[in-house]
Amino acid sequence: MLLIRRLSDAGAGPCGYLLMMTDHERLVTANNVILGLSNVALNFILIAEFGVIGAAAATAASVTVFNFIKVFEVWWFERLVPYSGAFLKPLFAGLVCGGVMILLERLLLLVGLDIGMIRAFVGGIVGVCAYLIILYALGVDEKDKKLVENLYV
């Protein structure tokens, strides 16, 4: 659940700051008040039913929805789209990687490997490898190549 929240934060990027810098700070304030109230309401509902997992789901859901709203507001008020076509490759690779990791978990459970740390370690290694292979198969942008080259200099 927390991963979903962090991914939505990364996906929305600096949209909230962009709205504040373009004279929409009252809108950002209203968004934050509504986010807080919806988070409290969802927590009240989901904690009673699911406990700690409900709290994580409530926070992830409310933050994710408001991150999508911020992206929409940036488009609506400023006619800016915070994404380019280059964003789709890592997104697709991440989705396929997630699918591979879910299938691997099911396979490990099927063979009887029910030790959480081993599954997490194997899943992490396979997931990172799958992500990098898919990203490489889709083609690496010149900007990304330069970034990697500069990391090793």
Image (spheres, grey):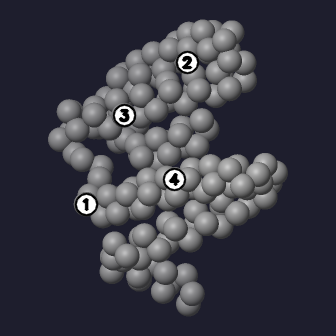
Q: Which residue is mark 1?
A: 85
Q: Earlier in the sequence, mark 2 or mark 3?
A: 2
Task: Please tell me how crowded label 1 is: few (under 14), some (14-19), or many (20+) other residues with Cα within 10 Å.
Answer: few
Q: Earlier in the sequence, mark 4 or mark 1?
A: 1
Q: Which residue is mark 3?
A: 68
Looking at the rendered structure, the kind of residue marked 2 is: Asn
Location of residue 7 with respect to 76 vertically, above or below: below
Task: Determine contact: label 2, label 3, CB under 8 Å.
Answer: no
The numbered disc on residue 39 is 2
Looking at the rendered structure, the kind of residue marked 3 is: Phe
Nearest the camera: 59 or 98? 98
> From mark 3 to mark 4, how far is it between C-alphas?
21 Å
Nearest the camera: 46 or 5? 46
> From mark 4 to mark 2, how far is it between C-alphas?
27 Å
Q: Which residue is mark 4?
A: 98
Q: Regarding mark 3 in the picture, which secondary structure is present there?
A: helix
Q: Nearer the viewer, mark 3 or mark 4?
A: 4
> From mark 3 to mark 1, how far is it between C-alphas?
18 Å
* Among the 4 quarters of the image, the one containing residue 96: bottom left
The quarter of the rendered structure image containing the N terminus is: top right
Q: Regarding mark 1 in the picture, which secondary structure is present there?
A: helix
Q: Position of residue 121 (x, y in %)?
A: 73, 61
Looking at the rendered structure, the kind of residue marked 1 is: Gly
